[in-house]
């Protein structure tokens, strides 16, 4: 028996079956997928940057 994976739609929190029959996974519908895409496009979502100086050029030790 194959185990069914259930995920939660990131937009509306509805439960979605993770399978080939769910073309918008992890979203429940095209609507939720497009809402999420729009939030990225308007920069409502942002990936946090660290405040540390770790993004400076790495020092090379000889």
Image (cartoon, helix red, strand yellow):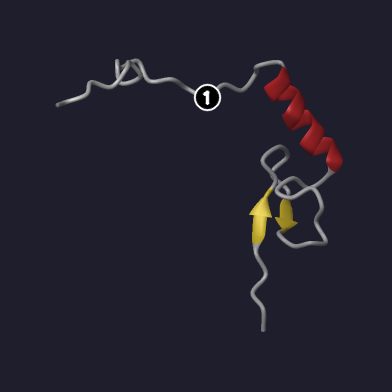
- Coordinates of residue 9 in the picture (x, y in percent): 70, 45
- Up/down of 5 relative to 32, above or below: below
- Identify residue for label 1: 47
In the current view of this chain or complex, which residue is farthest to the front?
Answer: 62
- Coordinates of residue 30 in the picture (x, y in percent): 85, 41
Mark 1 element type:
loop
Choose top left, top right, bottom left or bottom right for residue 44: top right
In the current view of this chain or complex, which residue is farthest to the bottom?
Answer: 1
At x 79% / y 48%, what residue is drawn?
Answer: 24
At x 67% / y 70%, what residue is drawn?
Answer: 4
Choose top left, top right, bottom left or bottom right for residue 45: top right
- Coordinates of residue 43 in the picture (x, y in percent): 65, 16
> Which quarter of the rendered picture does the N terminus lie within?
bottom right
Q: Give the left or right position of residue 24, taking residue 44 as reference.
A: right
Choose top left, top right, bottom left or bottom right for residue 58: top left
- Count how many numbered circles sit on residues in the image: 1
């Amino acid at each position: 028996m194959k185990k069914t994976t259930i995920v939660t739609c990131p937009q509306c929190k509805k439960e979605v079956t993770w399978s080939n029959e769910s073309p918008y996974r992890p979203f429940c519908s095209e609507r939720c997928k497009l809402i999420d895409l729009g939030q990225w496009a308007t920069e409502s979502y942002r990936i946090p940057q660290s405040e540390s100086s770790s993004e400076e050029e790495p020092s090379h030790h000889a």
